[in-house]
Image: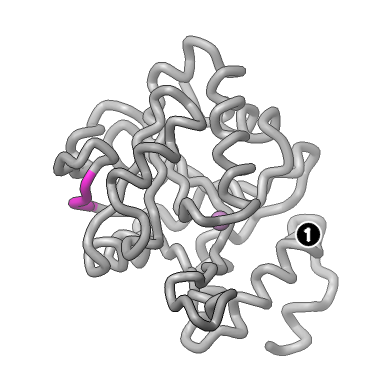
Amino acid sequence: MSDENQSPKTPGSLTVRQRITAMTLAAFAGIAVSFVIWQVVDPETGPGTSGVVTGQSGVALVGGPFSLTSHEGTPVTDKDFAGQYMLIYFGYTWCPDVCPLALQFMDEALTQLGARADAIQPLFITIDPERDTSDVIKSYVANFHPRLVGLTGTPAEIAEVAEAYKMYYRKTEPLDATNPLSYGIDHMNVFFLMGPDGTYIAHFMSPTSPKDVAAAIASHLP
Ligand code: NI
């Protein structure tokens, strides 16, 4: 990383925490590119008054078709959600803190939006296809919004959708050296809001409250 990324910028620059997150991500091999992409996608982000960073440009850069498997074990594609907004969160069910909190925010934000949330399909896409089978995800999503749909897939399918959304993640070393499946996954903490035609509308990084998420979403609804 160069000093350029750490120096104070305009009020529209990232918060310290987000900058640290971005720098951590950029430290991973091959991920420096993502930082550049996110700067391009997200040139006018800022903490603002809500604490939620949003971005609206880079429409062509984020999202795309996907073919995955629902928590009910049925095939699902992006076409199944045509006509609805998609509120997408990428994570994994073993995540000790970030994912459960984000999904709780998602749940509460949709509740706060009331009838307006009817137009929104909340989706949880695992970045851990090895451990997150449909059955595992089915039990997990039951803890959150009643309409939350969990999606998994083959490692190749998950890698493809994650790449389409510029969703960067990286496995950590196993916590228990004798159990290779005891790894964690570092990942970006970001919601994506996609339009009824499937195109990117905005993303919300590192939200700090359900109210922030609700306000950010509401600003993009008709
Ligand atoms: Ni997580």
The spot of residue 60 in percent (x, y) is: 35, 57
Q: Residue at x 61, y 28 (%)?
A: 214
Q: Per the image, is 17 magenta?
A: no
The spot of residue 9 in percent (x, y) is: 80, 68
In which quadrant of this rendering is ligand 1 seen?
A: bottom right
For label 1, the SS is: loop
Residue 90 vertical placement versus 85 (above, below): below
Asked which quadrant contains residue 149, the reply is top left
Asked which quadrant contains residue 3, the reply is bottom right
Q: Per the image, is 68 magenta?
A: yes
- Please state if 91 lies on the left or on the right of 134 as rendered: right
Name the kind of residue labelled 1 in the image.
Answer: Thr
- Please state if 206 lies on the left or on the right of 181 as rendered: right
- Please state if 142 lies on the left or on the right of 113 as rendered: left
Q: Which region of the structure is painted magenta? A: 65-69
Residue 101 vertical placement versus 44 (above, below): above
Question: Where does label 1 land, which residue?
Answer: 15
Compare residues 184 and 217 and report the one nearer the observer: 184
**Can see residue 187?**
yes
